[in-house]
Image: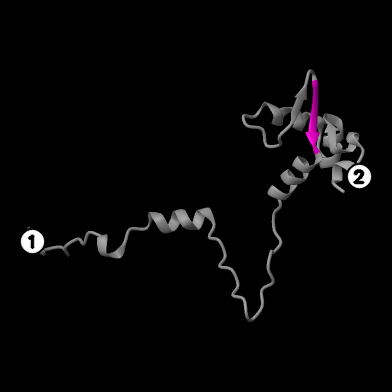
Amino acid sequence: MSIVEETPRSKVYESNAGAAEYLDCSENWLDKDRMNHPPKIPFFKLGTRIKYKIADLDGYMEANKVGGQEASVGPESPAAEPTPSVKNVRKAQSKPDEGMKRKRPAPGQEVAA
């Protein structure tokens, strides 16, 4: 038996107000999201009515999940390397390679051409 057969049709799709309540956000946020191209959350427009599929709302929530670990970290599984911050990456990129530095002659030393 599929979910559609188990669930009344009104519960498969949510209105704008229902979707806002489901996501615990404002209707205004959903209105603004629909103006994005493409919107973050897919929706259906039926005349002037807006409908969201509950599965799409759940998918949006999963796609925006932060933190947590998918697999356990133990002695048999190596720990994931921490992701460097943007600041550290930029700092590393801005440092010139030691071999590429131009060496200045000491005062009184001649420059070889």
Query: Mark 1 or mark 2, which has the lower sequence index?
Result: 2
The residues tagged by marks 1 and 2 sit, at their Cα atoms, a distance apart of 85 Å
Q: Position of residue 99 (x, y in %)?
A: 26, 64
Q: Residue 59, how many percent across, how many down?
A: 73, 45
How packed mark 2 is, by other alpha carbons closer than 10 Å (few <14, some 14-19, many 20 or more), is few
Asked if residue 32 shows in the view, the reply is yes
Type of the residue with mark 2: Glu
Question: Where in the figure is residue 72, as x and y percent of width and height?
Answer: 69, 71
How crowded pointer 1 is (Cα within 10 Å; few <14, some 14-19, many 20+) is rated as: few
Marking on residue 11: none
**Residue 63: image location, x then y, percent:** 69, 48
The number of callouts visible is: 2
The overriding secondary structure of the stretch rendered in magenta is: strand
Residue 51 covered by magenta stretch? yes
Magenta segment boundaries in residue numbering? 49-53
Which residue is most to the bottom? 75
Question: Quick check: 58 above or below 70?
Answer: above
Query: At 62% across and 76% down in the image, what residue appears?
Result: 77
Residue topped by disc 1: 112
